[in-house]
Amino acid sequence: MGELAGLLVAVFWAVLVTLLAVVLVRLSKVLREATVLVAAVTEQAVPLLRDANAAVRSAHEQLERVDEITANVQDAAADAKALSSTVAATLGGPLVKVAAFSHGVRKAVARQRAGAATLPQQAGEREELARMIRAEVRAQAAPRRGLLAKVRRAVRG
């Protein structure tokens, strides 16, 4: 019985060692394949990383150019805004007066063609017209201190 037990233990150890040897052989194959795979990935990854680095540098240069262009456009927009406000201040008042005058002339011509009198007939209309004329005379006689007056003085010398 003792011999049989010893024989069984020896067979068990032999099977166990054989299984472990098979596992170790397979593991060594897997490790070799993993080493080859890592080497291949390294070979391909290094050029990809160089290309990615070059692309990032190029994008950075382009963004710097875009920043310069944006700053120039912003300056041009500010200059255009200043120019438009100067033109509006210089020409705005006279254009409004010309428009008001032409409207008044058209209205007067239309009244004359319709046979209406040239002066308003109702007292309220006459007072309103007199008030508007006095306001216009006061506005023309008032001293000018605004931007428009400064521009006119600068142009005249």
Image (cartoon, rainbow, N blue to C red):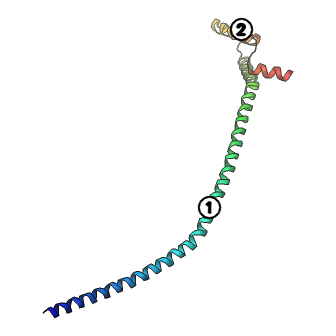
State the residue at coordinates (26%, 87%).
Answer: 13
Residue 39 position, x and y percent, is 53, 75
Quadrant housing the N terminus: bottom left
Q: What residue type is disc 2 on?
A: Arg
Q: CA distance from mark 1 to mark 2?
A: 76 Å
Q: Is residue 101 above or below residue 67?
A: above
Q: Are marks 1 and 2 in contact (CB under 8 Å)?
A: no
Q: Secondary structure at mark 1?
A: helix
- Vertical placement of residue 63 versus 42, above or below: above
Residue 74 placement: quadrant:
top right
The answer to which quarter of the image holds residue 115 is top right
Residue 24 lies, with reference to residue 135, above or below; the image says below
Residue most toward the left? 1
Q: Position of residue 71 (x, y in %)?
A: 69, 42
Please give left or right for residue 25 compared with residue 151 in the image: left
Quarter of the image for the C terminus: give it: top right
Q: Residue 47: x and y, percent?
A: 61, 69
Residue 118 visible within the image: no
Q: Residues within 10 Å of mark 2 (few under 14, many from 20)?
A: few
Report which residue position mark 2 lands on. 134
Instruction: Tell me the crowding category of disc 1: few under 14, some 14 to 19, or many 20 or more residues within 10 angstroms, Cα based.
Output: few
Classify residue 33 as left or right of residue 92: left
SS class, disc 2 = helix
List the single residue furthest toward the right.
Answer: 157
Observer-nearest residue: 14 or 19? 14
Residue 52's image quarter? bottom right
Of the two numbered discs 1 and 2 on the same chain, state the one appearing first in sequence. Answer: 1
Viewer-nearest residue: 16 or 115: 16
Name the one closer to the observer, 123 or 46: 46
The residue beneath circle 1 is: 53
